[in-house]
Amino acid sequence: MLLCPSVWMFAQGSVVASDVEQLKQAIAECKRLILELPEHSGKQKDTVIKLIHLRLKLQELKDPEEDEPNLQVLLEHRFSKEKSKSVKQMCDKCSTIIWGLIQTWYTCTGCYYRCHSKCMNLINKPCVRSKVSHQSEYELSICPEVGLDKQDYRCAECRTPISLRGVPNEARQCDYTGQYYCSSCHWNDTAIIPARVIHNWAFEPRKVCRTSMRYLALMMSRPVLKLKEINPLLFNFVEELVEIRKLRQDILLMKPYFITCKEAMEARLLLHLQDRQHFVENDEMYSLQDLIDSSSGRLSCSLTEIHTTFAKHIKLDCEKCQAKGFMCELCKEGDILFPFDSHTSVCHDCFAVFHRDCYYDNSTTCPRCARMLERQHEDSQNP
């Protein structure tokens, strides 16, 4: 297939470069030919090369896309114009290839929804990040299917007619929502399902719709799972979770040492957990990423290393933190004790620390609590 004369002349550099309008027509003709020619054919590749030459000529005079805004806001999406011309992407609206070299395209900075510039006005799906902001909780039932008839045999999202027989459109089930979607809204992407992890400790990725895939990706690191309430029996069957819970409890006991220690604050020790900041706030909340890393063993190794670093600062490196240790008042023997030591027990009332064996063998009350009660009694007698 031959190029039109205007395209060929521009590609050969025989036309005056100041003729911007004619140059734009030549570029448009090249774009049309690229879309019409067989993909990966020699003629298509030659046309692409000529288009590059034409664009370079135009860039010397004028930005070919200067009329396209760099940022557009639509349905809570914040679309940013992409600069990449070589990477092939799929348009989430029309499900066709985005030719970055010849088509303008945008990506939402919140949920990474991609689309052609020409498809912008046809979008009817709001940004998934807004849902994450307003509804930060998972569906915790395993594939809560209600049936295609309850959906009136229409896609749960765009309401396109669908059928299990594939006529007029194939119905695809999302394992996260349990609902059925058309092929434009469900691309057979896979994701780990939170409900299957919490109830069955199963991490096999399942097929989900595009919206669920984005929602799960954005929610991955959010600590919204309170395992103690959702499935407390999980700790009876998963040893890794028991170990991680103990490490988290120890880290919370170490935190008061660090927030009152100038050296620890200057060394920013607590920033070792900046990727999992909820670990220094409580020992109950988990993110889906925490559970995935627990299953692989990565989280246990990482927390053990951090636990060792923290304990070394308190017990060996810092004299001020060492001075905040305890002596066992029951046996009055042994080394300085800390509440996060494995062989100690802590009084629930006054938080004094004792050897575990001494604490459980002792039949009397805590010595420190006894002193505090006696002092209170004396103060009441002598106001």
Image (cartoon, rainbow, N blue to C red):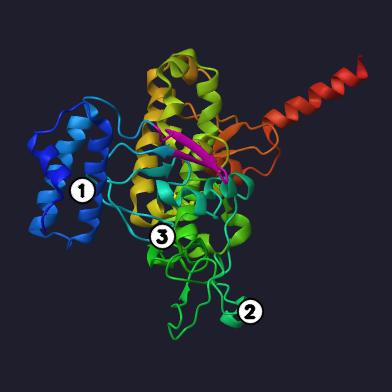
State whether residue 330 appears in this view: no
Whole-percent x and y of residue 338? Answer: 51, 30
Whole-percent x and y of residue 187? Answer: 39, 65
Label 3 secondary element? loop
Q: Which residues are magenta?
A: 67-79
Outermost residue on the bottom side: it is: 165
Lower sequence index among marks 3 and 1:
1
Instruction: Please report contact status of discs 1 and 2: CB closer than 8 Å, yes or no.
Output: no
Taking the spot 45% from the left edge, 60% from the top edge, the residue there is 210
Label 2 secondary element? helix
Foreground of the two, 322 or 175: 175
Q: Is residue 75 magenta?
A: yes
Label 1 secondary element? helix
Q: Which mark is residue 150?
A: 2
Whole-percent x and y of residue 36? Answer: 22, 60
Taking the spot 43% from the left edge, 66% from the top edge, the residue there is 184
Lower sequence index among marks 1 and 2:
1
Q: Amino acid at mark 3?
A: Cys
Q: Amino acid at mark 1?
A: Cys
Q: Quadrant of the C terminus?
A: top right
Foreground of the two, 247 or 13: 13
Whole-percent x and y of residue 95? Answer: 38, 61
| Pointer 1 local density, CA inside 10 Å: few below 14, some 14–19, many at least 20 | many
Write down the residue under mark 3.
94
Write down the residue under mark 1.
30
| Pointer 3 local density, CA inside 10 Å: few below 14, some 14–19, many at least 20 | some
Lower sequence index among marks 3 and 2:
3
